[in-house]
Amino acid sequence: MMRRDLCLKAIARHVRDDDIVLPVYSTAFDWLDVRPHPLNYLSHGAMGLASSHALGLALGRPDKRVIVLDGDGSLLMNLGTLVSIAEAAPKNLYHFVMENGTYEANGGHPIPNRGKLSFSGFARSAGHANVHEFADLQIFEQQVGAILGEPGPAFACLKVVPAGPQERDYSRLHGPHVRQAFRDALAKS
């Protein structure tokens, strides 16, 4: 099992300045500490919809890589998106799922069937050709650059430990200034 913040640091080393990154819920707080950037698309309040938003952005902006930093609980809310992504097959979409077995943002409650389901299996069954799974940080660090270099859609399940209670300043995620910064950065590029 890996720590989410270390996985995010490994991903950040391969994120380009013009990439759009969609971090969700607890992952968003860690990501903002690792890589604050105006092209971070913060979709709080839309549990399960980050991958759907990412699909729309990837199709609408094929000139940009779109990277989703999802949670297992969030993805469970919208498993159908895996089928839509596989069918549309945007070559610029990369979906990383942090599997910690909990709805961490909602108090750490266990997800249904924790430990008995396979998010990589869901992605393969939905038709994704590029599916990866990691539980060892060293191996993930060695391969993340290649994953982000292959044509999408790519899916990677990262087995991470729950982070536990966190201090959350939601003003960093919400508000018109955050949305305006994203719109401005997207319009510039």
Image (cartoon, grey):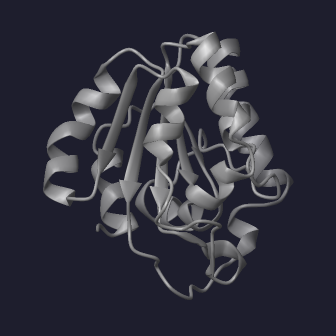
* Residue 54 in which image quadrant: top right
Q: Is residue 34 left or right of residue 22?
A: left
Q: Identify which residue, 144 or 72, lies in the foreground.
A: 72
Q: Identify which residue, 181 or 92, lies in the foreground.
A: 92
* Residue 45 in which image quadrant: bottom right
Q: Is residue 5 left or right of residue 98?
A: left
Q: Is residue 178 left or right of residue 100?
A: right
Query: On the rendered image, what quadrant is the N terminus found in?
Result: bottom left
Q: Position of residue 122 (x, y in %)?
A: 53, 38
**Above or below — where is 11 with respect to 4?**
above
Q: Position of residue 123 (x, y in %)?
A: 51, 33
**Above or below — where is 72 with respect to 100?**
above
Say whether residue 69 is visible.
yes
Residue at screen point 65% across, 67% down: 112
Residue at screen point 63% across, 69% down: 111
* Residue 66 in which image quadrant: top right
Q: Position of residue 61 (x, y in %)?
A: 64, 15
Residue at screen point 79% across, 42% down: 180
Q: Identify which residue, 50 or 156, lies in the foreground.
A: 156
Residue at screen point 65% across, 63% down: 25
**Above or below — where is 90 with respect to 55?**
above
Q: Position of residue 75 (x, y in %)?
A: 64, 49
Residue farthest toward the right in the current orientation of the protein: 176
> How many numbered marks appear?
0
